[in-house]
Amino acid sequence: MFKKILIANRGEIALRVIRTCREMGIKTVAVYSTADKESLHVRFADEAVCIGKPSSVDSYLNIPHIMAAAEITNSDAIHPGYGFLAENAKFAQICNDHGVKFIGPTAEMINMMGDKVTAKETMIKAGVPVVPGVEGLLESLEHAIQSAKVVGYPVILKATAGGGGKGMRVVWKESEMEKNYTTAKMEAAASFKNDGIYMEKFVEEPHHIEIQVAGDQFGTVCHMSERDCSIQRRHQKLVEESPSPFMTPELREAMGAAAIKAASSINYEGVGTIEFLVDKHRNFYFMEMNTRIQVEHCVTEEVISFDLIKEQIKIAMGEKISGKNYFPIMHAIECRINAEDPYNDFRPSPGTIKTLNTPGGHGVRVDSHVYSGYTIPPYYDSMIAKLIAVARTREEAIDTMYRALSEYIIEGPGIKTTIPFHLQLMQDENFRKGEFTTKFMESFKMK
């Protein structure tokens, strides 16, 4: 049993980890930037250490400061949450070198799945379906043009070290290649300090469906069914749900088996997610693996009644998992509540919250770190809450979500949120019928 866990993160995920640790009788240490000194994760942790100025580079990405905080507090484990250093192999290795358990996979596993080209090659060897494309990185513009002729338009250019839609461009014809190739490389270099680009066939009318997996230190891997993340804007997820309305029992069995094969191929340790693109004919292709807890893990927790954070910690402590696969017994939908203006191209909208009413009632869960008087800082991701509705059927879950959104009030000077967007989405005919792909937002208009 760990005696004390340092959470190398902020906001709602830090608070989420603190809650599970408290239930397990484990002490916690919060780290925070000067911009987050009034955050709830700082207040509810057993100890708190300031690690730097507001910039992420000076605080939540500052490995020496985080390791110093772990040393002075005698923390024996570090939970990275999601984002920041959660998939940083160097950080995982430094934790190991200093005798502090990194709650997640090893540095080697992170490296194997963190680089998209390496991950794709690993999946091909494991027999997991992948999107057709070109082996290795594109060496030049001419290489990209010739490769596209072989793969066939449309193609998609992706940053090998990428995520969140950065360094990603769809090319529909040869005349568009030079501009998109140059832009993708520049964006990749700026975002990841790695301008490596690779090419895949662009899957039209795709669904983004991911499988939650867990693996222990003894080689056992299980899956916990799927989440549908197709409602997204510029490759950033807005809504997630489980089970997927596009799923069939046969597809779930096949995708679950492929996800287990993918995780087993690297002897995966911890919880993680295998992400797939699924075309309109329900052919599925490996896209990437996230070697961490996901933002949308709450959806899975609600439909299978399972604490994934607790599972992470138990695996890190060396406990065995049962190997049992889990399947949805309820339906859950998660809406990301962001401090963004949906009427103004989702522009970030930080400020101080003056009025806050959090929804409640049967079937409603809110994961958030904000409160009345809290100032939303402009330095980090704009997500301020996750609203989850759970019910016996998808229709009931949508109705519960609409009711909860109607009760949610977040007001303050200059603050706009995505609540109006989600309210409109819950009434959208196509969404309610489950008829949507990752292109849904391209035609969605705010009223």
Image: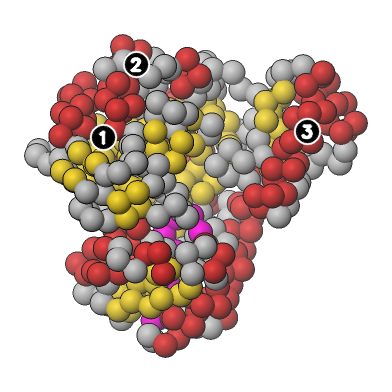
**Residue 5 in view (yes/no):** no
397 relative position to 361: left or right: right
Q: Is residue 183 above or below residue 217?
A: above
**Mark 1 near mark 3, Cβ–Cβ under 8 Å?**
no
- Tag nearer the camera, 1 or 3: 3
Residues packed near mark 1 inside 10 Å, few (<14), some (14 to 19) or many (20 plus): many
Query: What kind of residue is marked 2?
Result: Lys
Q: Amino acid at mark 1?
A: Ala
Please name whichever residue, 158 or 283, is drawn nearer the observer in this view of the structure.
158
Residue found 51% across the figure and 77% down from its top: 65
Q: CA distance from mark 1 to mark 2?
A: 26 Å
The magenta segment is: 75-84
Residue that badge 1 annotates: 332
Near-viewer residue (27 or 109): 27
Residue 6 is labelled as none
Q: Amino acid at mark 3?
A: Tyr
Tell me if 202 is positioned left or right of 351 in this view.
right
Toward the top, the furthest residue is 429
Q: Residue furthest front?
A: 413
Dot 2 corresponds to which residue? 447
Q: Main secondary structure of the magenta part?
A: loop
Q: How many marks?
A: 3
User: Residue 115, relative to residue 37: is it above or below?
Assistant: above
- Above or below residue 438? Residue 8 is below
The residue that appears at 49% across and 69% down in the rendered structure is 53
- Is 274 situated left or right of 333 in this image? right
Task: Tell me the tag on residue 181.
Answer: 3
Between residue 76 and residue 214, name the one nearer to us: 76
Instruction: Verify CB contact (< 8 Å) between mark 3 and mark 2.
Output: no
SS under mark 2: loop
